[in-house]
Image (cartoon, rainbow, N blue to C red):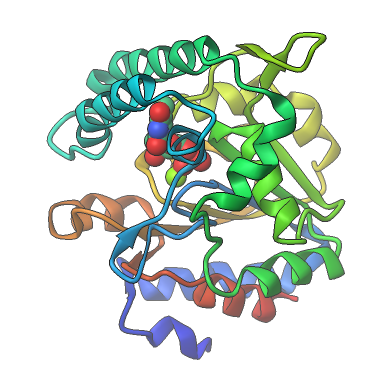
Amino acid sequence: MIPELSNPSVLMRDPQRVQEILESMVKAGSNTLQVISDFDMTLTRFAHNGKRCPTCHSILDNSKLISEDCKEKLAGLLNTYYPIEIDSSRTVEEKLPLMVEWWTKAHELLVAQKIRKDLLSVAVRESGAMLREGYQLFFDHLHKHSIPLLIFSAGIGDILEEVIHQAGVFHPNVKVFSNYMDFDESGVLKAFKGELIHVYNKREGALLNPGHFQELRTRRNVLLMGDSIGDLTMADGVQDMENILKIGFLNDKVEERKQPYLNSYDIVLIKDETLEVPNAILLYLT
Ligand code: TMP
Ligand code: MG
């Protein structure tokens, strides 16, 4: 039905089920659709030419806005906690307090750097941040068809917005839930606002925003895109859900994580740096 679903990067636990969900969504019409996507390593690339691409946090961590000493400390945190984030032998419950620890320590280090708001755009421009191939079509198509896109990120909202702004795709149908920076009156970072969002508490983040999902209550069909097991809870706030199709990018530690990903995502994309499959699905649905 969708030729791209036969791409070598595509794995499905139950292709028949995927077919049924897609048919049901087509029948319901694109005015019942909403898209909820993670940002880092889902809308952005994991690697390019064999080199890792940065997350929102690492755009800052690698920038001139951070001292060498702080860079070392942030790299230390990444080397300690990222392997835990993706460790399939530990439960989410075990990982949860460790993720809070990672985010809390990283944010404290960033705040101590007195980062200036007016320099964030330069940091993004000079970084190697890259949206996945096909991003233009993805964002433009959703905008053209007035389909709401919620970007739900445990990264940094200010950085994420700058990335999509610089790419020219921050259209009015895009809404962001993320960790936002709080600046003092002279434009210097003093804290992070609101409740912390980390990779494994997106469910709580979703439930803290009932107004958004209330507004979209007629959009009962959801296309969810993520790269972490934690991303599966991003749609927990959706009201009166009819169908959900979950697409998971499996970027790293593929062999050991394949089974858990296949068990929880309807479509698993193995080391696929493009949005070809989500785009083909969107074109089919609209
Ligand atoms: P996401 O929800 O948009 O994918 O963002 C979360 C990612 O950010 C997660 O994979 C870990 C990453 N991260 C860093 O790269 N550096 C950090 O300091 C922190 C706290 C998270
Ligand atoms: Mg991610």
* Quarter assignment of residue 235: top right
- Identify the residue at image location x=52%, y=50%: 127
| Residue 49 horizontal side relative to residue 163, left or right | left
Indicate the quadrant containing the C terminus: top left, top right, bottom left or bottom right.
bottom right
Where is residue 238 drawn, in percent x and y?
A: 67, 38
Q: Is residue 48 above or below residue 199?
A: below
Residue shown at the point (41%, 61%) measured from the top left:
266
Residue for point 21% across, 28% down: 91
Taking depth in this image into account, of 266 and 109 the one nearest to the observer is 109
Q: Quadrant of residue 119?
A: top right
Residue 73: x %, y % from top left: 30, 20
Front-most of 216 and 151? 151
The image quarter containing residue 93 is: top left
Residue toward you, 245 or 142 = 142
Residue 51 visible in the snapshot: yes
Say left or right for 202 vs 177: left
Give the image quadrant in which the ligand numbered 1 is located: top left
Residue at point 69%, 42% (across, down): 121
* Rendered location of residue 221, percent (x, y): 67, 55
- Give coordinates of residue 240: x percent, y percent: 70, 41
In this rendering, the answer to whether 1 lies above or below 192 is below
How many discs mark residues in the rendered view?
Answer: 0
Left or right of 51, for residue 186 = right
Q: Is residue 238 visible?
A: no
Task: Locate residue 144 relative to residue 82 in the image: left or right.
Answer: right
Closer-to-camera residue (157/96)? 157
